[in-house]
């Protein structure tokens, strides 16, 4: 912006909600302190400014003399008539800056990096120079009461629903898994109670990180997504399969917190009370009989220890890996709830082996095959089984709440299709309702769909693919015939032995 005298007026953005970032080292002002503001809203931290002075002092000693090529006598005589312009007169403007408005302090001379050649108009503008995904919001000012030593809670304890209310809301979306919903409701309530209400006295309440075990398609991820939506807290869902030890190809463990910070709109205070769900946690189990370095197994478990327990972690903003061009911020994981989930294949065999190791031959002894068809076998898991599977004791100890989810049977799959608020049948009925067509399903048809899903062994994920398959022709033909008023899906149509019943209008 310019005034009548064409003098440049720099807009003061000290009240901006985002922190300023050093252009050279990409650190935020919460890490390095107050910064020096240059033209075009460019900021430089004191450390980088000191390095700039050091380079200026040493540039004269290390710069090499310039060797000029020989010139003809005629050219020399022509140039002798013109006044010679020095480098300073050529590069610097009358106001002391160079042509692009960069102070001469940043021009390091020959043989060194010249920022004058890198400047593009508007590149350093605070609104366009740094992507919004890499800008960190300023921390909210502390409001301490008299005699208080800690910050007030971000969440309101009075608005936090009790465990039975949390479970009632989960029942509207998640079918079955009664014990799992009860455990997760109590654990989440206790966790946010310690976050929102300062503990009195000298008793410190520990975290209630959870380990969720269940077969694929039983609702582990959906349960956490529903919980975060009901509590209105930031949620980050990540897979442990992409995590590797620091220094190797893949995501570092800090990338888990980067996703949480992005979900909180780069608000550190809000991210520090969020939920992180690490799926496929069984994929980072220790590899057996491996001679090379296990960079995606035990090493990842060691790296996650500090996150689960609670520590100040430097996190890249707007990226999943640390590099020189990404700003960094610090997140405290003390009040972040970590939920780990996995299918843990072959864990049932380990449990069965432990339970049947004392079986002997005789009339009064247990049979070795008595646990083969036990539907509650997975619920009998303990720390010894998890350690045998490949989780290190330190990692198991930081997940005190361990619970299991049952595999889905045909009856539960039928309820999943009909009862939840966003049930899959209600979704297709709404799609055809927009075409003024009533869609109905026979009970035998729903049972046939559930049996087909059980054959695929993919849990509730197999329902949509089955329904989408036989609904394709119906959704294709209905818009062509405006006389269709109602469609009944029958068992014969699901099994490929007949077609749907169609009722015309009027």
Image (cartoon, rainbow, N blue to C red):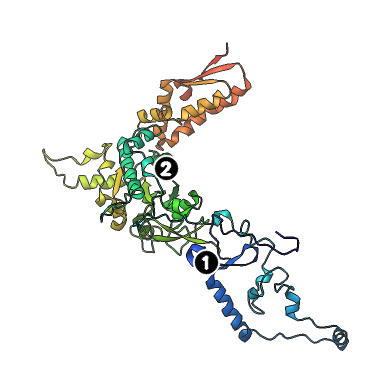
Quick check: 145 above or below 422?
below
Which of the image's four quarters has the C terminus? top right
Q: Which residue is mark 1?
A: 34
**Mark 1 surroundings within 10 Å by alpha-carbon count, few (fewer than 14), some (14 through 19), many (20 or more):** some
x and y, in percent, of residue 222 in the image: 42, 39
Q: What residue lies at 54% left-to-right and 27% top-to-bottom?
A: 431
Q: Which residue is mark 2?
A: 228
Asked which quadrant contains residue 461, the reply is top left
Is 112 on the left or on the right of 366, as rendered? Answer: right
Farthest residue toward the front? 146
Is residue 287 something one can see in this rendering? Answer: no
Q: What residue lies at 44% left-to-right and 53% top-to-bottom?
A: 269
Quick check: 471 above or below 394?
above
- Could you give the CA–CA distance between mark 2 and mark 1, rounded to whole angstroms? 37 Å
Is residue 124 something one can see in this rendering? Answer: yes
x and y, in percent, of residue 220 in the image: 38, 41
Is 300 on the left or on the right of 98, as rendered? Answer: left
Quick check: 341 above or below 116?
above
x and y, in percent, of residue 22 in the image: 56, 65
Asked which quadrant contains residue 132, the reply is bottom right
- SS for dot 2: helix
Q: Are marks 2 and 1 in contact (CB under 8 Å)?
A: no
Quick check: 44 above or below 376?
below
For marks 2 and 1 on the same chain, the one whose residue lies earlier in the sequence: 1
Q: What residue lies at 42% left-to-right and 54% top-to-bottom?
A: 143
Which of the image's four quarters has the N terminus? bottom right
Query: Of the numbered discs in the image, which one, if any, rests on residue 24?
Result: none
- SS for dot 1: loop
Give the camera-side residue of 470 and 103. 103
Judge depth for marks 2 and 1 and give the one in front. Answer: 1
């Amino acid at each position: 912006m310019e005034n009548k005298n064409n003098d440049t007026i720099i807009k003061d953005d000290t009240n901006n909600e985002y922190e300023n970032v050093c252009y050279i080292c990409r650190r935020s002002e919460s890490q390095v302190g107050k910064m020096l503001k240059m033209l075009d809203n460019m900021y430089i931290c004191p450390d980088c400014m000191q390095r700039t002075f050091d380079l200026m002092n040493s540039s004269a000693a290390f710069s090499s003399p310039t060797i000029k090529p020989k010139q003809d006598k005629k050219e020399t005589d022509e140039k002798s008539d013109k006044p010679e312009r020095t480098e300073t007169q050529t590069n610097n403007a009358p106001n002391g800056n160079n042509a692009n408005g960069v102070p001469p302090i940043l021009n390091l001379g020959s043989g060194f990096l010249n920022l004058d050649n890198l400047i593009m108009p508007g590149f350093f503008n605070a609104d366009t120079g740094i992507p919004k995904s890499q800008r960190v919001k300023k921390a909210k000012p502390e409001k301490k009461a008299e005699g208080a030593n800690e910050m007030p809670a971000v969440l309101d304890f009075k608005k936090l629903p009790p465990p039975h209310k949390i479970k009632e809301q989960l029942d509207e979306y998640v079918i079955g898994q009664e014990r799992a919903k009860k455990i997760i409701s109590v654990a989440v309530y206790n966790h946010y109670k310690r976050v929102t209400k300062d503990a009195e006295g000298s008793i410190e309440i520990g975290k209630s990180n959870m380990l969720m075990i269940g077969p694929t398609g039983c609702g582990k991820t959906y349960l956490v997504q529903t919980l975060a939506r009901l509590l209105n807290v930031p949620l980050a869902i990540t897979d442990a399969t992409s995590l590797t030890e620091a220094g190797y190809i893949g995501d570092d463990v800090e990338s888990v917190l980067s996703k949480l910070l992005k979900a909180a709109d780069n608000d550190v205070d809000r991210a520090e009370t969020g939920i992180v769900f690490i799926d496929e946690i069984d994929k980072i189990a220790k590899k057996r009989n491996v001679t090379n370095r296990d960079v995606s197994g035990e090493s990842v478990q060691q790296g996650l220890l500090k996150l689960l327990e609670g520590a100040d972690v430097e996190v890249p903003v707007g990226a999943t890996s640390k590099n020189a061009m990404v700003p960094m911020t610090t997140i405290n994981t003390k009040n972040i709830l970590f939920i780990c989930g996995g299918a843990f294949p072959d864990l049932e065999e380990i449990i069965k082996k432990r339970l049947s190791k004392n079986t002997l031959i005789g009339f009064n002894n247990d049979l070795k095959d008595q646990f083969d068809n036990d539907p509650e076998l997975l619920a009998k898991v303990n720390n010894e089984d998890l350690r045998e599977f490949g989780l290190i004791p330190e990692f198991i100890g930081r997940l005190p709440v361990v619970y299991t989810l049952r595999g889905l049977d045909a009856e539960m799959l039928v309820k999943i299709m009909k009862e939840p608020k966003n049930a899959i049948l209600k979704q297709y009925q709404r799609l055809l309702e927009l075409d003024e067509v009533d869609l109905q399903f026979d009970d035998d048809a729903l049972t046939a769909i559930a049996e087909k899903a059980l054959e695929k062994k993919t849990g509730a994920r197999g329902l949509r693919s089955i329904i989408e398959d036989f609904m394709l022709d119906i959704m294709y033909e209905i818009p062509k015939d405006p006389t269709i008023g109602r469609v009944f899906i029958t068992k014969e149509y699901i099994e490929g032995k007949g077609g749907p019943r169609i009722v015309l209008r009027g």
